[in-house]
Image: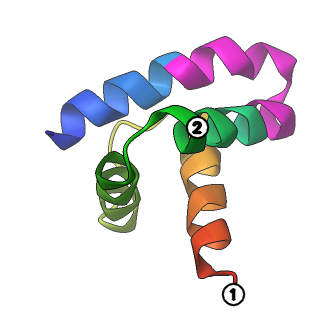
Amino acid sequence: MQAERLVMMANQIAGFFAREGPETGAAKTANHLVKFWDPRMRRAIVAHLEAGGDGLHPVSRAAVTLLTKEAAQP
């Protein structure tokens, strides 16, 4: 799946949860991505963030950062 589409989808999800504040919004967005996105989609959005994260909403960016931290835990 193209990065632009993933960014759009992540931003839509983050836009919904952003109303709850940046930290809660990021946590709930990350939780949604874990529950409903295929692992390949999560890897692709993480790779997009690592390449600069163009177009990611701040809450989306924070959510994807949480995904990378969770993946790095043993």
Dot 1 falls on a residue whose secondary structure is: loop
Vertical order, 4 against 61 (above or below): above
Gap between marks 2 and 1 measured at Cα: 19 Å
Residue that numbered label 2 is attached to: 35
Q: Position of residue 47 (x, y in %)?
A: 32, 63
Q: Which residues are magenta?
A: 13-25
The residue shown at (40%, 51%) is 42
User: What is the crowding at mark 1: few (fewer than 14 residues within 10 Å), some, or many (at least 20)?
Assistant: few
The residue indicated by pointer 1 is 74
Judge from the rendering whether residue 35 lies leftward or rightward of residue 19; answer left or right.
left
Is residue 47 shown left or right of residue 24?
A: left
What SS does tag 2 mark? helix
Q: Amino acid at mark 2?
A: Lys
Look at 21% across and 42% down and name the residue there. 3
**Kind of residue indicated by mark 1:** Pro
> Which color scheme does this rendered protein use?
rainbow
Tell me the residue at 71%/39% (across/down).
26
Q: Quadrant of the C terminus?
A: bottom right
Q: Position of residue 52 (x, y in %)?
A: 35, 60
